[in-house]
Every structure is written in structure tokens, then in C-alpha cells.
Amino acid sequence: MIDRDKAFRILSEIGQEHVLKYFDELNETEQKELLSQIEITDFSVLENLAGDHNSGGERGSFEPLGAVTIKDIASESDRFTQTGVEALKAGKVAAVLLAGGQGTRLGFDKPKGMFNIGVDTELYIFQCLINNLMDVVKLAGAWVPLYIMTSEKNNSETVEFFKEKNYFGYDPAYIRFFIQDMAPSVDTNGKILMESRSKISLSPNGNGGWFSSLVRAGLLDEIKEKGVQWINVFAVDNVLQRIADPSFIGAVIDSGMQSGGKVVSKVSPDERVGVLCLEDGMPSIVEYYEMTEEMRTLLDDNRELAYKYGVILNYLFNVDKLEEICDRKMPVHVVSKKIPFMNDNGELVKPDSPNGYKFETLVLDMVHMQDSCLPYEVVRDKEFAPVKNAEGVDSVESARKLLQANGVKI
């Protein structure tokens, strides 16, 4: 851990020395907590305050992008799967699980992956994902290195939970945990906000920060030493998703493209899902709220939606290209927010209106920085069971029904 002098040098270089204002009044535990925060915080995001304060800037010119369809995949299944299995056996594929979130929207004050989605039996979200990955391990006869990104808030609980559950049968030698980089919150003058005398107001640096966080954790060297060429990144909340899917891997490798994204066909023009498409001739994701009415309803020659393929946050990226992106630096989105903060009297204030900015990087920008991306269509009812809400659409209830429909005992 860094010491006080190094922390002061880091902060003084960016004009944020006030973060240590009360340091000498803190007890030893609080001092360590603050120094730890300073160490894991990405202060480079503050450079983005020089530009316009918005949540992404102007978008380019969009065009539809076709996919390797379910029908295409069925006809080429043996070839795709063989290519994928060979890559897995050769140790060329790793997986990254984005698991930094809490289960707040489920009424669950623990890491989301610890939520028990079972009814008559214990079946945790993490367990569902490990079970899905184990299917691939058995098929390929090889373990897949699994990197689990946690947050500062939930890391300890997550690591202990996996130990307690004996990693759900996965070989722990192939599992690594790392903490997502945090970004500071600032007021409208660009000064870092404090939650208390010993706590900076921090938030995770967005789902696009997974690779830079992995690099900062020192894991890229290990990945390259293993000979890993492809990383399958996926989110924690889809309990049916196939991870390190040999057919998906094989399709992307055979295509010669730099990346791939699993997609599902939209159920209606107004479904609230981002769509994989082209933007200024490059692969991109257009969010549902960015689509015009014309884009939402446009039909192709087959009288199907032209902007049809919704993303499910399951991507395959080439490691060399990821390194290039990391060197170039991803776009940082500056978002106006209501941010609780400690005032000059040491009191915590919860504002009623936006009072500052948070910083995010987004995986959709990572896709847009690729030269090519293969949309790979999957059967919705077999691979898409998101657990975002306690009830209703994309809920615990709907995911349980889909798990049962796919033969999973809950």
C-alpha cells in the first residue's frame, strides 16, 4: 500500500490535496482505508473535465449489421465447435466475469452473484454461471482461466463466498479475482468530493473499465504467459448464458474478425435493448433511447427489423487488440449526478439536484474501437435469462421459469 507521502504527491500533481485535509486526525484504520482508496482510484479521468460535460457526445451515421443467424450456426455447428474446442484445448481462451454489482434491485444487500435463485434447492447466480462454464470444461477436456472482477465494496464477500462454496466445483487454480478501478466523483468546479473525512466519493469506472482494471491488477502478464489470445467477457446477471462457448469462439475465429458479440432477435421494435450495428462504418452499439422511430421500425428485404440484433453483454475480444485500445485510451463519459458529499462542517449532504460529475467507460465504446465484430445470434429462451428486477420483466421470477424450461433443477 502507498504511504502518506506518496499519496500527497499523487494528489498535489492534480491539485486535489484537500483529500488529505483531515488525515492526521484519523485513526490508523481510517488512514489505511483512505490510502487504499487513493491507490485504486483512476485520477486520469479528471482530464475529461476540460471538454463538454455530457454523457457521450455526438453519435455518427448508423447502418444495420447482419449476423451469423441461428440457422447459419446450425448448419456450421460441427465446424465452429471443432475450431472452438481446439482453441480451448490449446489454452487460447479465457473468460472475464463482471461481478462488481450488488443485488440492491432484488432487495438483496450482498453481491448480486450470491443471490439464491433456487426455490426448492440452493442455486446461486454464481453457481449457475460456473455450472454453465463447467459444461465447456467437460466438452473441451480443459480448464478455462476465469477472471472475476469485483468492486471495492463486494470483493471480500465474493472471495469468501467462493471459498465457502468450494468454488462450486471449479478448480481454484484457474480462478483469479481482481478489483475494478474506481473513479472519483467531483463537484462542478472539478474538486473531488468526500463522503467523510476518511472516504473519497468513488464509483466503479463503468463496464468498459474491465480490461484496464485487469491490467492494473497485474494479470495481463499472466494471461499472455498462458498464451491466451481471446477473452470472453460477460455480465453476472444472465443465468442462462453460455460462457467460452466453443461454437461462438469458432465462428469468430473462422470469420477472421477481431471480436464477436452474442445477440438475440428483438421481440418488438420498442424492446429496450442496445443493438449491434455499424456507426461510421465501424461496429458499434446503438442504445434503444438513441434510436429514431425510423430506425426502430425500418424493415429489411425480408420484411424483418433491420436493426434487429440486441446485445446481451457477452463478447469475445482479441487480446492484442485490447492492448491497443488500452494504449489509445477509451472515451470517458462525464455524467451529471446527484452525489452525496461531506460539506465544510463535516456533515453528509444528500442533494436534491445534480451537484457534480461521475466518470464512466462503456463496453459499447470498446466494441466501436474494433475494426470488425461478428454478431452471433443465439436462441433467446436458451441463453438469455437476465436477473435485473425482483419481479416483472427480466426478473427473478422470469429467470426461474427459463431455468426450469431448460432442465435446470431449482
Image (cartoon, helix red, strand yellow):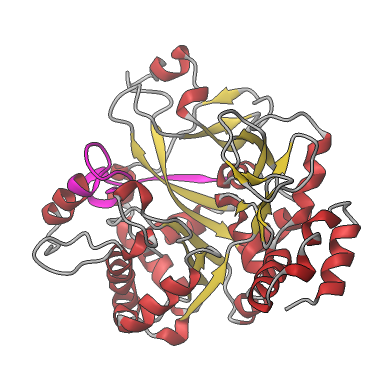
Q: Would residue 122 be found to the left or right of residue 167 on screen?
A: left
Tag count = 0
Is residue 121 placed above or below 407 in the rendered structure?
below
Q: Quadrant of the C terminus?
A: bottom left
Q: Is residue 387 magenta?
A: yes
Q: Position of residue 289 (x, y in %)?
A: 48, 24
Is residue 168 placed above or below 120 in the rendered structure?
below
Q: Nearer the viewer, residue 121 or 129?
A: 121
Residue drawn at (64%, 52%), measured in percent from left and top? 201
Residue drawn at (40%, 80%), measured in percent from left and top? 143
Q: Position of residue 59 (x, y in %)?
A: 64, 26
Quick check: can you spot residue 408?
yes
Q: Nearer the viewer, residue 226 or 12?
A: 12
Is residue 132 placed above or below 329 in the rendered structure?
below
Q: Is residue 117 magenta?
A: no
Q: Position of residue 272 (x, y in %)?
A: 38, 30
Quadrant in which residue 190 is drawn: top right
Judged from this view, the residue extending furthest toward the front is 345
Quick check: can you spot residue 257?
no
Q: Position of residue 271 (x, y in %)?
A: 34, 27
Judged from this view, the residue extending furthest toward the top is 294
Quadrant in which residue 52 is drawn: top right
Is residue 204 placed above or below 152 in the rendered structure?
above
Judged from this view, the residue extending furthest toward the left is 120
Q: Would residue 254 be found to the left or right of residue 330 on screen?
A: left
Residues in magenta, as a range: 372-397
Secondary structure mostly seen in magenta is loop
Q: Would residue 335 be found to the left or right of residue 240 on screen?
A: right
Residue drawn at (70%, 72%), measured in percent from left and top? 31
Q: Would residue 96 be found to the left or right of residue 281 on screen?
A: left
Q: Quadrant of the N terminus?
A: bottom right
Q: Nearer the viewer, residue 314 or 251?
A: 314
